[in-house]
Structures are given as structure tokens and as C-alpha cells.
Image (spheres, rainbow, N blue to C red):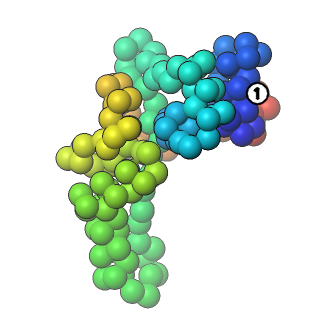
């Protein structure tokens, strides 16, 4: 289901909750489309925190394959993406939170940056991925 459709369903009272990435909400709330902005006036962006443990955050990563023909340049590219300048640029242009804790969230994202992120490590996510996939499949999630 498209993000705008999810928000419309909540705003229209069809459902009470929609799951989406925060950057979609921020894009709609600050974009040029008046209809999108109106939808965000009817819904609220929230960051659920089960038992105060923090909200789930999506993670992104990069790596260099063992058989990469140009490992040095691949590593330079990853270092470039991780740099403060790149993180600031990516965050500003995608309405996302920067991956680096040393880079502040840009406006308008900063207005939503007061949530607590769950500190679960990537290794813990990976270890439970098969269990999560099984649950999603059983529930019919696509």
C-alpha cells in the first residue's frame, strides 16, 4: 500500500495505525502537494517504544566483497558515504536521519528527532531474522 494511502486510511478513520518510514511523513508534511500536507494534519508521526526500550530504526550498511576487483576504491566509496559531509547531504535531500551520531538531523527532520532509538545491535537483528520472517509469513505480511 502506498504511503499516502496509508496516511489517508488513518486520517479517514479506516484504521488507527499505519506503519511507514518517517521520511515519507516528513516529505508529505513539507512537500508542495497541498493534499499531502492536509493528510499529515490529520495524523501524527509517532515512534512506539515498547516498555521504554526505544523505537525500531531501519539500518543501512555497506561492505566490500572478498572477491572485489578494486577493494581500495570500494573502501574509499564507503568512507565517502560515511563522511560527515555526505551524511549531511543525504539526510537533507532524503529527509532522513543521518547514520552518524556526529551529524545533526537537518530541518525539517530535526523536528521529529527527539525519539529514543532501540539500541539492539545489527548482530541481534540478524540472529532473529528467520524468526521474524516466519512470523511475517504466517501473518500474511508482504
Q: Which quadrant does the N terminus fall into? A: top right
Give the percent coordinates (x, y) of residue 59. Answer: 44, 46
Q: Quadrant of residue 142?
A: top right
- Count how many numbered circles sit on residues in the image: 1
Q: Residue furthest left?
A: 102
Residue receiving disc 1 = 139
Which residue is depicted at the point 73% across and 33% down? Answer: 5
Give the percent coordinates (x, y) of residue 6. Answer: 69, 29
CA neighbours of label 1 inside 10 A, class few (<14), some (14 to 19), many (20+):
few
Which residue is depicted at the point 45% across and 74% down? Answer: 65
Which residue is depicted at the point 34% across and 58% down? Answer: 89
Dot 1 falls on a residue whose secondary structure is helix
Which residue is depicted at the point 33% across and 35% down? Answer: 110
Q: Residue furthest bottom?
A: 69
Give the percent coordinates (x, y) of residue 74. Answer: 37, 77
Can you say whether 3 is above or below 13 in the image?
A: below
**Is residue 36 rendered to the left or right of residue 118?**
right
Q: Is residue 73 visible?
A: yes
Relative depth, front residue between 2 and 78: 2
Q: Is residue 134 visible?
A: no
Relative depth, front residue between 37 and 86: 37
**Is residue 12 rendered to the left or right of residue 86?**
right
Can you say whether 138 is above or below 13 in the image?
A: below
Relative depth, front residue between 58 and 25: 25
Give the percent coordinates (x, y) of residue 24. Answer: 55, 39
Amino acid at each position: 500500500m502506498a504511503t499516502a494511502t496509508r496516511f489517508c486510511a488513518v486520517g479517514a478513520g479506516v484504521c488507527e495505525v499505519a506503519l511507514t518510514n518517517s521520511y515519507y511523513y516528513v516529505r508529505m508534511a513539507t512537500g508542495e502537494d497541498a493534499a499531502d500536507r492536509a493528510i499529515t494534519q490529520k495524523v501524527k508521526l509517532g515512534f512506539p517504544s515498547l516498555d521504554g526500550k526505544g523505537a525500531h530504526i531501519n539500518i543501512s550498511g555497506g561492505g566490500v566483497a572478498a572477491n572485489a576487483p578494486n577493494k581500495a576504491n570500494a573502501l574509499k566509496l564507503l568512507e565517502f558515504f560515511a563522511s560527515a559531509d555526505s551524511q549531511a547531504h543525504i539526510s537533507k535531500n532524503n529527509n532522513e536521519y543521518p547514520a552518524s551520531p556526529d551529524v545533526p538531523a537537518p530541518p525539517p527532520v530535526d523536528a521529529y528527532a527527539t525519539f529514543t532509538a532501540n539500541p539492539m545491535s545489527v548482530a541481534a537483528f540478524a540472529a532473529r531474522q528467520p524468526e521474524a520472517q516466519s512470523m511475517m509469513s504466517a501473518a500474511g505480511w508482504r
